[in-house]
Amino acid sequence: MRFNPTSTKTIRLRTPQREQRGVTLIELLVGLSIGLMVIGVAMGALMVSRGVSGTVSDVSTIQQQAAYAMRVIGQQIRQAGSLYLNPDPLGGAMANPLNPVIFETDAQDTGSAPISFSQAETIGAPSATEVTSTFRRYLDAVYVSANPTSLVRNCLGGPEDSAANATQQAMVSAFALHPATATLRCTGNGVGPQPIVQNVADFQVRYMQQLPIPTGTSVRYLAHDEVTDWRSVQGVEVCLVLYGTEVIDMPAPANAADPQGTYVGCDGNRVDMTSLASPRTRRMHMVFRNVFQLRSQGLLRVDS
């Protein structure tokens, strides 16, 4: 209030007040839109990162399984037909390294019948998706054991060292594709089949045969039903196709010669991954090939 000395009236002055304003509807909508755009970009980046991470994990898992399978198969196939070298066939201590040795060519099977280690009995091919390797399970002197012990095992890690397995029996490993469960199974020495690799799309086996010809030697690959002389088989080719678990947004091939969305299988034909049945459709497929030479079969050399 202000007092005027020339007047008896009192003048009341009003102080101006600020108006209170909130967020308008338009401002609210703009803010929500910007926020949703930021969330959308973040979610998109997260999904891309998730897809890349899943694909990388798929590749790593497939390669690890393939490396394990090839290592186990290779260990058994390379030994097929191997013989036991007895450094003391006559008994007694051997002081002279030039003393004669002997190859022992027979072993007991999982029952009691002896197996002769001819090539036809040490590698078998019941079908194109199966292969069997057999070699002698021999015993060695081991420092930690009072009795001779076997240091070799089949594809399942057996048979165990026991009184029943004290004989130098045959070591058997049989690999076969089980399409119903998409697994590669192994069996041997009386143990039932057990899966060793999963997500198997294909498993094919061919046999490398080497024969002498007038100009040298001829090497060719044969299917299991084309081999007539197993003693001429020098190696085994294994083809393994594994698939992943992550769904990939892959384009369908435009024609039969278009490589996108396809892979070349064990039989040499191109496979469309976008038209496969579940659970293989739009999954990554990787093909692995390896040739294992039989240690019991040396390569031939014929001079012309």
Image (cartoon, helix red, strand yellow):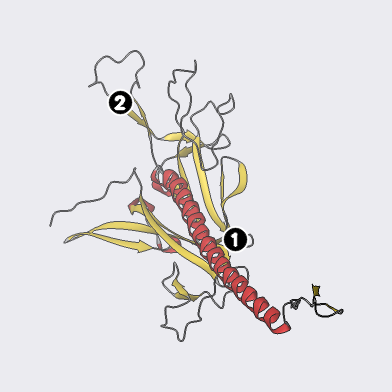
Residue 201 visible in the shown view: no
Residue 32 visible in the shown view: yes
Disc 2: which residue:
101
- Mark 1 lies on a secondary structure that is loop
The residue under label 1 is which amino acid type? Ala
Disc 1: which residue:
182
The single residue placed furthest to the right in the displayed view is 8
Q: CA distance from mark 2 to mark 1?
A: 47 Å
Count neighbours of disc 2 (C-alpha within 10 A) and say few if under 14, some if 14 to 19, many if 20 or more: few
Q: Report whether 285 appears left or right of 293.
A: right
Foreground tag (2 vs 1) = 1
> Image height check: is 111 above or below 49?
above
Q: Quadrant of the C terminus?
A: bottom left
Count neighbours of disc 1 (C-alpha within 10 A) and say few if under 14, some if 14 to 19, many if 20 or more: some
Q: Which of these two is toward me, 162 or 227?
A: 162
Q: Report whether 124 appears left or right of 281.
A: left
The residue under label 2 is which amino acid type? Val
